[in-house]
Image (cartoon, rainbow, N blue to C red):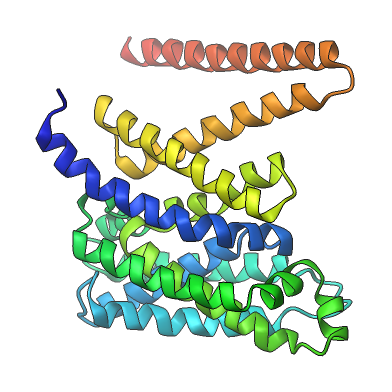
Amino acid sequence: MPDLSVVSILLPAFCECLVLVGIHAYLGIHVIKRQIIFVDLALAQIAALGALIAFLFGIEPHTWPSYWFSLGLTTVGAATFAVCRFRDSKVPQEAVIGLIYAVAAALAILLIDKAPHGAEQLKDILTGSILWVKWESIALAAVVYSAVGVVHYIFREQFMLISTDPEEARRKGLRVRAWDFLFFFLFGVVITLSVDVAGVLIVFVFLVAPAIMAVSITDRLSSQLFIGWGLGLVVTVLGLIASYVWDLPTGPAIIGCYALVVLLLSGLLYNLRAEDRAQAIRNTLFTVTAVALALAAIAAAGRMAQALLEH
């Protein structure tokens, strides 16, 4: 019989992860089709920067004033991303997004250096505190994400057309930049709320990993959604179990499980779809063996270095 105290601790975290996967798996499909993988990471970092600036002004983290501060800065980021999507540009939008992320991260580090308990604040920004999420926060996230989902459902044709074929959208008379701003603004609303609870890293993984797995398996959007949601649910459960069994931080444990499942799925799909399956299996075994030997060599070198230092 499971320990009820453990269930009472892990259940809110599981429900929060379920809500996060629900909206992020869908948005992740848009992100992959737009080929702007790091937009989530950039907006998450901007939201975290906003919360940090609010903290330096004496506003406590995880409060409404802190949230509005983050959302305001995220809205500026959304407008920037919408504007920087040029036609026939020599500079891809992903390069601008990456630069903005680097600037936001650098500013956050500079501000953390001046903040009291900066190291703890940085850890909270990166990994969040999803294990201690409250039911009120889960309910709020469910309502906000559902509202964003309704808007996306109503305008699903416009959003998907602009994500997959912006030139065709222009030919049909759609104002691409205006729709882009709406997309990024709604994205920012989700990210700002998510980062406040889960942290930058796990939010990024929830956006990208389920979408990568779903898009790798099928090209049908409806199937991609259900696969992303299903795999997200399974991996989240595995991460929470690993966190409990091995006494690991919850967020990093979930991220590690996602990484493992993505690798296993990639290997499985590679072998199933290969024209020469026997050669694919040999390549897989060679890669696994090489990685295992490299890890063993690194571990042996580490033990030798430790022994030399002790003597």
Screen quadrant of the N terminus: top left
Q: How far from the left and from the top, in percent, is residue 79?
A: 59, 85
Q: In screen coordinates, is 215 left or right of 58? A: right
- Which quarter of the picture shows residue 156? bottom right
Please name whichever residue, 278 or 100, is drawn nearer the observer in this view of the structure.
278
Q: In percent of the image, x 72 and y 29: which residue is there?
A: 269
Q: How far from the left and from the top, in percent, is residue 102?
A: 56, 65
Q: In percent of the image, x 58 and y 78: which residue is there?
A: 154
Please name whichever residue, 89 or 176, is drawn nearer the observer in this view of the structure.
176
- Which quarter of the picture shows residue 110? bottom left
Screen quadrant of the C terminus: top left
Instruction: Work out whether residue 126 can be spotted.
Output: no
Instruction: Work out whether residue 233 can be spotted.
Output: yes
Q: How far from the left and from the top, in percent, is residue 2?
A: 16, 27
Please name whichever residue, 252 or 5, is drawn nearer the observer in this view of the structure.
5
Q: How far from the left and from the top, in percent, is residue 73?
A: 45, 82
Tally of numbered tags? 0
Q: Is residue 187 above or below residue 309?
A: below
Q: In percent of the image, x 25 and y 79: which residue is there?
A: 64
Please name whichever residue, 152 or 287, is drawn nearer the observer in this view of the structure.
152
Q: In screen coordinates, is 91 left or right of 178? A: right
- Which quarter of the picture shows residue 214? top right
Q: Is residue 12 above or below residue 125?
A: above
Q: Is residue 308 above or below residue 211?
A: above
